[in-house]
Image: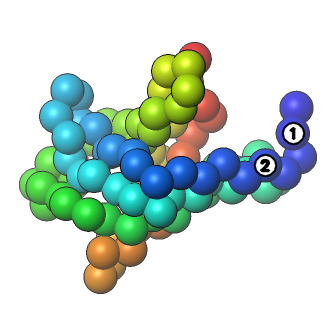
Amino acid sequence: MFEKLTIHGDVASLLWGYRTAATLSAWRITKDQQQWKLTATVQQMDAFQARQRPLLFSAPHENGRWCWMVEELHISDRKLTATLGQPLQ
């Protein structure tokens, strides 16, 4: 598989079940040494839902959606950083 990879976009969401815990912009996912890392700008957030687990990162693309489970999450001053699990299929 890939040793290094970067994916980025303008619109994404953090989902708790079917609920939108946060809407994100300017997101970027990088993969390096088997770790997936997410950075993004938080546009809107429900603080309660964003603290629940499990959370799913979801971003649209031309043929559907990319999804990753969120393993660790940090939000500060509208900046989000997260460690993600493997991509879901």
Task: Identify which residue is drawn at 78% across, 49% down.
Answer: 5
Q: Do the CB atoms of the residues marked 1 and 2 lie less than 8 Å apart? A: yes
Q: Is residue 77 left or right of residue 48?
A: right
Q: Which mark is residue 5?
A: 2
Amino acid, disc 1: Phe
The N terminus appears in which quarter of the rendering? Answer: top right
Q: Up-down: is 37 above or below 19?
A: below
Q: Which mark is residue 17?
A: none
Tell me if mark 1 has few (under 14), some (14-19) or many (20+) residues whose alpha carbon lies within 10 angstroms of its own: few
> In the rendered view, how is the structure colored?
rainbow
Task: Identify which residue is drawn at 22% across, 28% down.
Answer: 17
Q: Which mark is residue 2?
A: 1
Residue 85: x and y in percent read 57, 39
Q: Is residue 33 left or right of residue 19?
A: right
| Nearer to us in this view, 17 or 45 | 45
Q: Is residue 12 left or right of residue 68?
A: left
Amino acid, disc 2: Leu
Farthest residue toward the bottom? 77
